[in-house]
Image: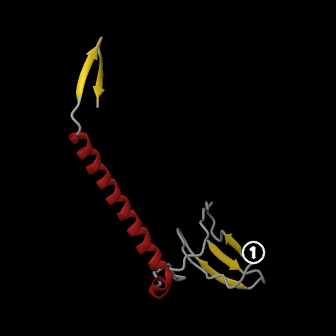
Amino acid sequence: MKETVTDPSGETVSNGEFDESFFTTIKPEGTGTYTVIVTNIGTQTAMVSGSFGYMPFASADGQPNFDDMMSGGLDMLILGGSLAAAGVVTLIVGGVITIADGRRHETTTTSESGVTYRKD
């Protein structure tokens, strides 16, 4: 398989050949329509599925780009992890409050024809 990406002016910004899977990233230099062409240069039938978007934390060869991570990508990862941790803490605190509140109330129950009522 061969991939080619061209920018709005028609200049090639990425091209490469691959066998099974392929990862690349480009940094758009301007607005407009970027064109992706995938060509089957082999003799076997091929199926293609793709995901497109700019990933500032990855270099063109798919490896992490630590310089760009430190300038924005890593900040978002830290923020996301912090929000997830805050959500877990909120769930735990809510559970503790619910249990403590349930133990604080004395409850009496009455039963009428098989139905149990709780009086607070």
Residue denoted by label 1: 33
Report which quarter residue 54 is drawn in: bottom right
Report which quarter residue 15 is drawn in: bottom right
Viewer-side residue, 90 vs 11: 90
**Residue beneath the point at 66% across and 81% down:** 28
**Number of other residues with Cα within 10 Å of mark 1, as a class: few under 14, some 14 to 19, many 20 or more:** few
Viewer-side residue, 52 vs 90: 90
Q: Horizontal and vertical percent for residue 31?
A: 73, 79
91 w.r.t. 21: above or below: above
84 w.r.t. 107: above or below: below
Q: Horizontal and vertical percent for residue 58?
A: 50, 79
Which quarter of the rendering shows the C terminus?
top left
Instruction: Report the residue that reaches farthest toward the bottom.
Output: 67
Label 1: which secondary element: loop
Which quarter of the rendering shows the N terminus?
bottom right
Instruction: Report the residue that reaches farthest toward the top.
Output: 113
